[in-house]
Image (cartoon, rainbow, N blue to C red):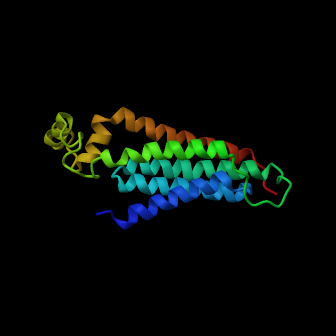
Amino acid sequence: MIEVVPVVLLGLVIACALATAVLRDVLAAIIAFAAYSLGIAMIWVLLQAPDVGLTEAAVGAGVTTVLFLLTIAKTVRPPGDDIFESVDPKGLVVAVLIVGVLASTLGALPPVGSAETPVAQSQVTDYYLDNAYEQTHVKNAVTAVLAAYRGFDTMGEAVVVFAAGVGLLVVLGREVFA
């Protein structure tokens, strides 16, 4: 049975993506993009990947949105009163075909958290679960994997988030707000 929350969240993400693509007002498109990115971050959390969700929320919904807003503050509004951009029919057909092909593969995926997933049946997973507590002295297996076994990868993610924050502070430091 399909749960309601993931379906509603997926619908929100798709609606925000479409709104971002067709809105003519740049500010409205940026807000739709921020909502899209926040929705994707929530999907990552539902898929039990909070580290990826946090990075998406910080960089996608946070830093990128602020940079976009600063960019449009320095530009002028395009002429015209149209709310939506015109859609290229050929591009729309290609996009719908790609989405259809990708959606057709969803039935082959195992349910989230299923014991039949390759990850759940992996020797590496068994090793982590059997040895994480003794080797790292951390009470949470996920934290042990992220901090000890995947330390360089986690450090790389932290560097990306830190660099995005520093870049934002540099940009904000150069701005003159009247």
Q: Is 10 on the left-hand or right-hand side of 110? A: right
The N terminus sits in image quarter = bottom left
Q: Quadrant of residue 135?
A: top left
**Residue 41, x across and y down, in percent:** 46, 53
For the point 20% across and 34% down, which residue is it?
A: 124
User: How many discs appear?
Assistant: 0
Q: Quadrant of residue 120?
A: top left
Q: In this picture, is 142 found above or below 7? A: above
Pick whichever, 9 or 173, lies toward us: 9
Residue that lies at the very extreme toward the bottom in this rendered image: 4
For the point 23% across and 50% down, which residue is it?
A: 140
For the point 40% across and 46% down, which residue is it?
A: 104
**Residue 74, x across and y down, in percent:** 80, 49
Q: Is 142 on the left-hand or right-hand side of 29? A: left
Pick whichever, 50 or 147, lies toward us: 50
Residue that lies at the very extreme toward the top in this rendered image: 152
**Residue 27, x across and y down, in percent:** 71, 57
Q: In this picture, is 52 found above or below 32? A: above
**Residue 101, x across and y down, in percent:** 45, 42
The C terminus sits in image quarter = bottom right
For the point 53% across and 53% down, which residue is it?
A: 37
Q: Quadrant of residue 146?
A: top left
